[in-house]
Amino acid sequence: MVFDRLTSFRSRLSSAGIIAALLLAPAVPYAGVPLDRIVAVVNDDVIMQSELQEKLRTVINQLEQQGTVLPPMAALKKQVLDRLILNKLQLQLASITGIRVDDETLNRTISNIAAENNLSLNQFREILVNDGYSYERFREDIRDEIIITRLRQRQIDNRITVTDREIENFLATEKHQGYTETEYRLSHILISTAETATPEEIEQARLVGEKVLEDLAAGADFAQLAATVSDGQQAMKGGDLGWKKADEIPTLFADYVRDMKEGDVSELIQSSSGFHIIKLADFRSSEKHIVTQTHARHILIRPNELLTADNVRTRLDQLRQRIKGGEDFAELARAHSEDTVSAAVGGDLGWVSPGNLVPDFESRMNDLGPGEVSEPFETQFGWHIVQVLERRDFDNSEEMKHARAREIIRARKIEEAQQNWLRDLRDEAYVEYRIDE
């Protein structure tokens, strides 16, 4: 859905004087209109009742679209407010570190969202307005989302590395444990504990987790409980973690999932971040990854101070005619191509899989049959002619395994680092709840 991209509108009240005035302002109606009020103080900023109500409305719409039974409103409101607080803290840090999103980037992102939904920008705007959303507020929501993404990339993602040794160890462990290509769909509930939690606080979290297990055993809906009590990132989606292969499942849960049947719920699983409960919602088998590979070769010439683009195109067209006349492509590539690596082997690019080459080149190559030579065309690297030698169906499962292993290891590291980072960010902040006033 379009509105899954929404995050709440955030007030920009950084002046201490304004904050103080808002804190002291009585929440009484004026001329029959109730005044907005503060529901949380976050460092030197605030979250207003209007922000909470707007985000709450969006979350309720999402839960209803997913067919999830709504949790008690008080619990849902607390969940949404906690998420707003985390977003506010991230935006504050982004502002301090100088992360900005200009209007050009914002406009391009919104245009892409509209295009992904097969809508023009005007049509997209009309739908927002008809559904009761302010377009201006939506713009700022998306700006905040981009800012938070860039902040996390800078603070977490860009610092994560995966070594070849880690990949080899991962694949060796996978082979030893006999993992298959089965995919699992998991749901997740987290009862979080702070890194500095006391034994009493940890015990209290455990008791909450035990009560959740009792409710689930009595027939309670997992998605509704996740939306009510879970501190996990996917709580507002009923705790749904989506489809994952066995080797993509977080290490903490892997041993449990292997022994579970569809519909099974785990016992309490304790980690440094709190107590977890997982449910195996579904599973399915995957097949081998077969792709159509192309064996091709090319000649590249770039425009320069002496050669215009027209000159280059003419020169390549002449080379093409010579090839069609029977001259050897490889010899001409060695003599004329400016791609020095491939020129040394007669322009040969070897066997290439979909996605290995830039889209413009791949598109032209895919239009050719074996033995055919393209007309001159341009990419970001210069002007080319390409010849397709042969094609084959290829099982690149091993290549995909290495690529997937790298992504899985990286995703696990990012998830763990992100949880710890958000927890530290929250623990170090001054937060005062005023939701019950």
Image (cartoon, grey):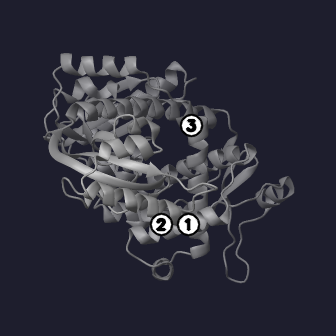
Sort mark 2 into few (<14), some (14-19) or many (20+) by Cα contacts within 10 Å.
some
For the residues labelled 2 and 3, say whether their Cβ atoms are less than 8 Å apart: no
Q: Which residue occupies 40% across, 27% down?
A: 206
Estimate the x, y position of residue 282 in percent, counting from the top left: 17, 44
Q: Which residue occupies 13% across, 41% down?
A: 287
Q: Quadrant of the C terminus?
A: bottom right
Foreground pick, 246 / 260: 246
The correct choice, above or below, for 241 with respect to 18 in the image is above
Q: Which residue occupies 28% across, 46% down?
A: 328
The correct choice, above or below, for 62 with respect to 399 in the image is below
Q: Residue furthest right?
A: 17
The residue under label 3 is which amino acid type?
A: Leu
- Measure how far apart labels 1 and 2 are at the Cα level: 6 Å
Disc 3 vs disc 1: which is toward the camera?
A: 1
Foreground pick, 238 / 109: 109
Q: Is residue 9 something that shows in the picture?
A: no
Disc assigned to residue 82: none
The residue under label 2 is which amino acid type?
A: Asn
Q: Quadrant of the N terminus?
A: bottom left
Sort mark 3 into few (<14), some (14-19) or many (20+) by Cα contacts within 10 Å.
some
The correct choice, above or below, for 195 with respect to 389 in the image is above
SS for dot 2: helix
Disc 2 vs disc 3: which is toward the camera?
A: 2
For label 2, the residue is 112
- Measure how far apart labels 3 and 1 are at the Cα level: 29 Å
Foreground pick, 398 / 328: 328
Q: Which residue occupies 78% across, 60% down?
A: 22
Estimate the x, y position of residue 102 in percent, counting from the top left: 67, 61
For label 1, the residue is 108
For label 3, the residue is 422
